[in-house]
Amino acid sequence: MNDSPIRSPARLLLGFALIALAAAASMRADDHQKCSNHGAAGSWSYRFSGSLISDPNNDGYPNDFPANGVGTLTLDPSGNVSGGGPFKTGCCLSQLTFTGTSSVHADCTGSLTLEIYQDGVDQGSFDVDEVFGDNANAFHWILTDPYHVISLDGQRQFHN
Amino acid sequence: MKRHISSISFAIALGILGLAPALFANDHHGCTLRNVAATYGYTVSGIRNGIGPAASVGSAELNSDGTVTGAQSASFNGIILSETYTGTYTVNDDCTGTAVLNVVSSIPAFNRTSNLAVVWDDNEERFRMIFTDGDTILTGDAQRVH
């Protein structure tokens, strides 16, 4: 009876330790199930490039001006997103910031709705389609609003 | 003997309990000059206002003291250039940063100072950049050579 695990403090502690390790490993595995709002949570960096259509009523070409930028963003496990960085259109440099919500599906596609600000001025609400890659350490976006031809690549700042 | 085995079990348990938090330790990082210092290969593409489409490929050595040296081949509207540069860069804890590069071109008319905003990602293995000078609409991607 003296060998009973319940009566051995050291074995009891070892049992708790193994359970803790299994739980930790399991939670870590959940992080790697990646294509969910929880799995996508973290700090990311991005670069985008493309064009903005300057006159929606003009079918001619060229009828656009280039737009690009880099920046960082944070996704939280509830699907809230915020971020920003420098943005160039034509001649001009400005600061882009955005907040919004993200919905990530198990098939690694998703969508976002972003409220975008340029130098603090609200530019409105924009829709984005997204797909994740590289074990959810990378994402690719496209703006789906008319008169925008913008795609964006993002990469997790740190991953295991 | 039992006491010896209990001591070993106790030590193993403490070791495992110490390991569990370490599984989460990588969730908190910051970028530093020391950690991003390396040689990177990169491409840049876009437009230089008044010149036309522009692209370059090269390598940049970022040193831990905040200095940069590099060399690149560039095409400005089809004019092929061989260029070197020196400069400085900064990096912030949130993995954003800046760089100022003094570029010496094989055609002296293209000598210039370039200003960049930079973001690192992928465990500081890569960075993305945008030129912030008024006459440029240029972005690029860089990745460590080793």
Image: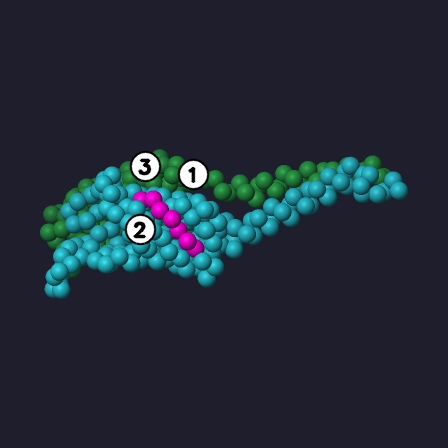
Chain colours: A cyan, B green
Question: Quadrant where the N terminus of chain A lies?
Answer: top right
Residue B117 inside the magenta-drawn segment = no
Identified by mark 1, the residue type is: Gly
Mark 2 highlights which residue?
A: A47
Q: Is residue B66 left or right of residue A123?
A: right
In the image, farthest residue toward the right: A1
The residues bearing labels 3 and 1 have C-alpha atoms spaced at a distance of 13 Å
The stretch of residues the image draws in magenta is A98-104
Identified by mark 3, the residue type is: Thr
Identified by mark 2, the residue type is: Arg
Give the residue at x 12% y 53%: B51
The secondary structure that dominates the magenta segment is: strand
Q: Position of residue A109 (x, y in %)?
A: 41, 60
Residues under numbered marks 3 and 1 in contact, where contact means CB atoms less than 8 Å apart:
no
Q: Secondary structure at mark 2?
A: strand
Instruction: Identify the subunit bearing mark 1.
Output: B
In the image, farthest residue toward the front: A125
Instruction: Identify the subunit bearing mark 3.
Output: B
Mark 1 highlights which residue?
A: B30
Q: Secondary structure at mark 1?
A: loop
Residue B90: assigned label: 3
- A104, A6: nearer the viewer: A104
The residues bearing labels 3 and 2 have C-alpha atoms spaced at a distance of 19 Å
Q: Is residue B65 left or right of residue A66?
A: right
Q: Position of residue B118 (x, y in %)?
A: 31, 44
